[in-house]
Amino acid sequence: MSREETPAYIARCKTCGAIVMATVDLPEHAKDVAKDIASCVRRGFAIEHVTVGYVRANWSSSCTCTQANKRVHTDAGESAPLQGSLFASAESTSQAESAPTQRG
């Protein structure tokens, strides 16, 4: 499976339809993905199962509704922006895994 075909979830604002969160559906992050999705459901966002390629092609505009400006809490108890989620961290993990490295 190519990176573009990797499964992901997105949350959309029900008012304007903008993507407000994306998370890569990786088995090793199943609990984090579940927390992200649950948080979005509680906030009233619409959830869709898509691919990473879909997210890249369609995340073009920002939600300007007040609902998207809410913040979610991280496991550490700090506030973190809702947008991005595991999508960015999974991308950096994928890039790191695909790059040759020496481990000692």
Image (cartoon, rainbow, N blue to C red):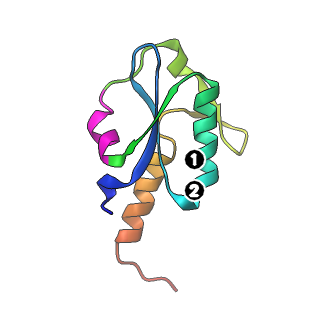
Q: Amino acid at mark 2?
A: His
Residue sitting farthest toward the bottom: 104
Question: Please, is residue 85 above or below residue 47 in the view?
Answer: below
| Residue 2 spot, x, y in % from top left | 30, 61
For the residue labelled by badge 1, is the local secondary structure a helix, a strand or a loop? helix
Q: Nearer the viewer, residue 61 or 101?
A: 61
Q: Residue at x 45, y 13 (%)?
A: 15
Q: Which residues are magenta?
A: 53-60
Please say whether residue 55 is one of the residues in the magenta stretch. Answer: yes
Q: What residue sits right under mark 1 in the picture?
A: 33
Q: Is residue 26 left or right of residue 43?
A: left
Q: Assess whether mark 1 and mark 2 are in contact (beta carbons under 8 angstroms).
A: yes
Please say whether residue 10 is one of the residues in the magenta stretch. Answer: no
Question: Please, is residue 19 above or below residue 96 in the view?
Answer: above
Q: Residue at x 35, y 77 (%)?
A: 100
Residue sitting farthest toward the front: 49
| Circle number at residue 29 | 2
Distance from Cα at disc 2 to Cα at disc 1: 6 Å
Name the quadrant containing residue 12: top left
| Residue 98 spot, x, y in % from top left | 35, 70
Q: Is residue 61 left or right of residue 96?
A: left
Q: Residues within 10 Å of mark 2 (few under 14, many from 20)?
A: few
Which SS does the magenta portion mostly show?
A: helix
| Residue 54 spot, x, y in % from top left | 31, 41
Q: Residue at x 59, y 40 (%)?
A: 36
Q: Nearer the viewer, residue 25 or 96?
A: 25
For the residue labelled by badge 2, is the local secondary structure a helix, a strand or a loop? helix
Q: Amino acid at mark 1?
A: Val
